[in-house]
Image (cartoon, rainbow, N blue to C red):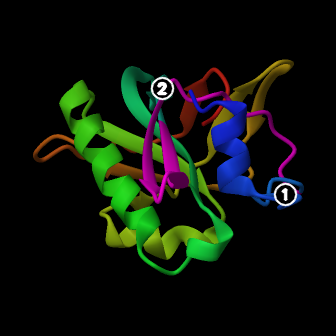
Amino acid sequence: MLTDAQRAQLEGDEHDPFDAAGVPLQFRAKERHVGLAQDGRLVASTGLTDAEVEVGGVRFEVVGIGGVFVARPRRGEGLARRVLEEALARAQAAGPSFALLFCHADRAGLYERLGFRALDDPVTVGQPGGFEPMALLAMWRPLAPEAVWPPGPVTVYGLPF
């Protein structure tokens, strides 16, 4: 997990660094992180977590990707891609056949270039009071050869990532 000091290095003085003010959901902390440091400072990071989903009545494990962030002065340098590529390599080694993430639609292009595809079916996610519709775009990526996301509504057990 990122320490408070590491998070402060990345986020600086940004008021809403993940543009989460309009998303009325709680998100889980990520257990594992991939970070990129330069000149002794953390400049980019993403988190990984194990999650269980159900699609069309079938439950399976995914690697959840979340908290992709690049320090403001370093944006536009390809650092998000670098930490995501390393995170995806670690996700492939973890065993599940799929990676899953949630993002604002205007950021989907980055993930599409890394092989993610948008889900068309509705997605619900766990929240403290029950299940709620996901307010962000959900995207998946195969981690195993020939893995294809099954059709049907998606339920994420536990908080989203």
Q: How many marks?
A: 2
Q: What residue is shown at x 38% (from left), y 30% (from top)?
A: 62
Circle 2: element type: strand
What is the residue that sits farthest to the bottom in this orientation?
Answer: 76
Q: Separation of disc 1 and disc 2 at Cα? A: 31 Å
Residue 27 is left or right of residue 53, and the answer is: right
- Circle 1 packing at 10 Å, graded few (<14), some (14-19), many (20+), is few
Q: What residue is shown at x 78% (from left), y 34% (from top)?
A: 132
Quadrant into which the N terminus falls? top right
Circle 1: element type: loop
Q: What residue is shown at x 37% (from left), y 42% (from top)?
A: 99
94 or 75: nearer the eye?
75
Quadrant into which the C terminus falls? top right
Q: Where are the magenta residues, as a range?
A: 22-47
Q: Position of residue 15 (x, y in %)?
A: 89, 58
Q: What residue is shown at x 73% (from left), y 46% (from top)?
A: 8
Residue that mark 1 sits on: 16
In which quarter of the view is residue 134 placed? top right
Residue 120 is left or right of residue 7, and the answer is: left
Circle number at residue 54: 2
Residue 45 part of the magenta segment: yes
Q: Position of residue 97 (x, y in %)?
A: 25, 34
60 or 120: nearer the eye?
60
Is label 1 in contact with label 2 (beta carbons under 8 Å)? no
103 or 32: nearer the eye?
32
Q: Position of residue 98 (x, y in %)?
A: 31, 39
- Circle 2 packing at 10 Å, graded few (<14), some (14-19), many (20+), is some
